[in-house]
Image (cartoon, grey):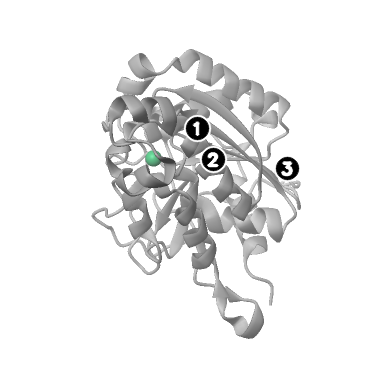
Amino acid sequence: MHVGWKLVAIMVTALIGGAGASEAWGQGRIPDKPKVLVVVAHPDDDAAFSGVLYQITHQLDGVVDLALVTDGSGGFRYSTLVEELHGLALTDEAVARQHLPTIRKQELMAGGAVVGISKYFFFDQLDDAFTQDPEQALTQAWDADWVRQRLVQLMEGGGYDLVLVHVPYAETHGHHKGATILALEAAESLPISERPVVLGGFACVLGEQVFEFSRLDGYPITAASSGGPVARFDRTQTFGFNDRLNFEIIGNWVIAEHKSQGVMQLRMNQLKEECYWSFDLNADGTITEVENLFQRLQVLR
Ligand SMILES: [Zn+2]
C-alpha cells in the first residue's frame, strides 16, 4: 500500500457533501446486491477497502471483482522476512522481478478470499519504482492505452454498478494515481446512463481528522467537488457473539496475507476507518445513492 497514509490532516466536520439527488436518476442505480469492480495498482492496495468489500459480499450478497494494473514486482526490498518461506532471495531485484508477481498474486487472492472477491483481472504492467508522478507509469512503464481499453471492456461488459479506486491525492504513489486516472477515463468513455459510479477510497483514521481531496492538479478528470468524503465506513463497528468482533480483524487478516510486503504488517490496527469520495464524472444523484449504500453496509442491529 506504500507510503502516504500519514498525511497532514485537515479537519473536516461534514461527513456528507455535494449536491442533492436527482429524482429521475435515483432509481436503484446501486442495487440491493451491487456488483463492484475494484481497480488498484498494487496487489495489497485493496486492503484499504476491506471493511466495505466484506460487507458488500457478506451483508448485501453482492459481487466484488478486482483488476490489478501492475505485476507487483516492486517494493522487493521489504521482502526480507519471506525469503526463507519461499526459499528465494526476494530482496534481490532480478529474483524479485521473476518471482514476486506470482507470490503477490497468491497473496492478493488469499486476502481476497477473506473479503469475498470473485474474479481477478491481471494486467501485469511493470511495477517499476516509487514516484509521485503518474506520467512515469502512464507514458513509460505501462501500456496505458491497453489498460484503459481493458477497463472499458470490463465496464461495458461486466455489469458493474460501482468501481472503487484509489483516491489520487497528491502524496500518494504515482501508480495509484495512474490506475485511478485510467479507470476514470474508461468510465467517462461510457454514456452516463451506463456508467458505473466511481468512488475513490482511502483507509483513514477514525475521528475528526480526515484529509480533503478535491482534485489532482493537472488531471481535471479526478475532480471530486465535495472536498470531504461522501461516505465513511467505521471498522470499529462491533458484531458477533457478545458484540466482540469488528472489521479491524478482517482488515488485519487481509494485511497478514501480504507477507512479502513487509512493512505493511505494521498497519494492523491502525486503519480505523475507510473514507470514500465521489468523482464529479458520476451522474447527478450519485451522492444520495452512495449514502444509501453505506447505510446498508452498516452492521444490522
Ligand atoms: Zn500501492
The response on whether ligand 1 sits within 8 Å of label 2 is no
Residue 299, horizontal then vertical, whole percent: 64, 70
Q: CA distance from mark 3 to mark 1?
A: 46 Å
Q: Is residue 73 above or below residue 31?
A: above
Report the label total.
3
Specify whether residue 166 is in view: yes
Q: Is residue 19 above or below residue 273?
A: above
Disc 1: which residue:
102
Q: CA distance from mark 1 to mark 2?
A: 6 Å
Q: Give, as a three-letter code, the residue at label 3.
A: Ala
Residue 82, horizontal then vertical, whole percent: 38, 46
* Of the image marks 3 and 1, the number of the one nearer the N terminus: 3
Residue 272, horizontal then vertical, whole percent: 43, 65
**Local secondary structure at mark 3:** loop
Circle on res. 236: none
Disc 3: which residue:
24
Q: Nearer the viewer, residue 10 or 272?
A: 272
Q: Quadrant of ligand 1?
A: top left
Disc 2: which residue:
106
Q: Quadrant of residue 267?
A: bottom left
| Residue at the (34%, 15%) spot, across then down | 140
Position of the C terminus by quadrant: bottom right
Q: CA distance from mark 3 to mark 2?
A: 44 Å
| Residue at the (36%, 30%) spot, across then down | 96
Q: Nearer the viewer's eye, disc 3 or disc 2?
A: 2
